[in-house]
Image (tube, helix red, strand yellow):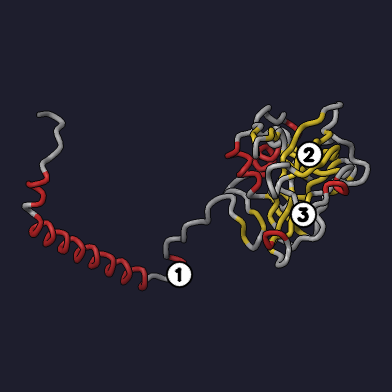
Amino acid sequence: PPYSRPRRSKIEGCSAPATMASAAIDDALAHVRSLIEDVEGALKPEERAPKAAKPSGSKQNGKPSSQAGESDDESALLFAKAKLVVARVAKADDHPEADRLLCLQLDVGAEATVPVVAGLKGHVEPAAFIGQHVVAITNLKPCKLAGRVSEAMILAASCERQGMPGNRCVRVLQAPAGAKPGARVRCRGKDAQNKVEAPKTLSSKIWAAIVSRLVVQESTALYDGCVLETEEGVIKVQGVDDNSEIH
């Protein structure tokens, strides 16, 4: 009947000829590869085909690289999609049902607080964390972590460090003195970021692309090699190695 699958017996009945044909094809391909190698070997270096470029957004020597041919405006417009703000830790408690999580309340300005569940237990002391001014992204899709709703995410940098929880050193990004909750975090020198408003909800795919360009250099948070800052000063990260990733 139409569209019926071929019977296996017809294929299996030709196993020997098929094997011979496959071997002949392999020999022909090997011969072609040999010819290509001979030709390439005879060419001068400048005449050879260029090697494929690394995937866009990759990190070289620990520093994020922009997409090939991407302008500063395009990089800035990508960054502007993330609503990064200064937030004050108003409340911090251990999660009652998770060993590595803290339950937080963040003051994000305009008399608004949001619940956050963060994997910072063992890296910060809840009591000492209260009152600190950190950096948070507030337009990710809310989610539930260990049964608790989380409506934002605190940014932190991490690097390998033996003897610390999970053999990782984790340090939260610190806002400059005087920065008030709700103040936007900007990228120095990328003026195009001021031309657009951040979307209400940022997709995880776009956020991952932004995160791939965040890194620490000399205790300073960078995006695409540019300093993160507020009007009051620079966003700092103390205690982690250069080239530590921010997430």
Tell me the kind of residue under disc 2: Leu
- Read off the residue under disc 3: 123
| Mark 1 neighbour density, 10 Å: few (under 14) some (14–19) many (20 or more) | few
Tell me the kind of residue under disc 1: Pro
In 3D space, how far apart are the residues under numbered discs 2 and 3 (Cα atoms)? 14 Å
Kindly indicate the quadrant of the structure image that contains residue 148: top right
Q: Measuring from the top left, give residue 50's x and y in whole percent.
A: 46, 60
**Residue 178 as seen in the image, left or right of residue 87:** right
Which element type, helix, strand or loop, lies under badge 1? Answer: helix
Q: Measuring from the top left, give residue 206's x and y in whole percent.
A: 61, 39
Kindly indicate the quadrant of the structure image that contains residue 43: bottom left
Discs 3/1, front: 3
- In this view, the residue in front, 75 or 152, is 152
Residue at 47% x, 57% y: name it: 52
Task: State whether residue 40 is above or below residue 221.
Answer: below
In 3D space, how far apart are the residues under numbered discs 3 and 1 (Cα atoms)? 52 Å
As drawn, the label of residue 45 is: 1
**Residue 74 as seen in the image, left or right of residue 108:** left
Which element type, helix, strand or loop, lies under badge 3? Answer: loop
Badge 3 vs badge 1, beta-carbon distance below 8 Å: no
As drawn, the label of residue 104 is: 2
Tell me the kind of residue under disc 3: His
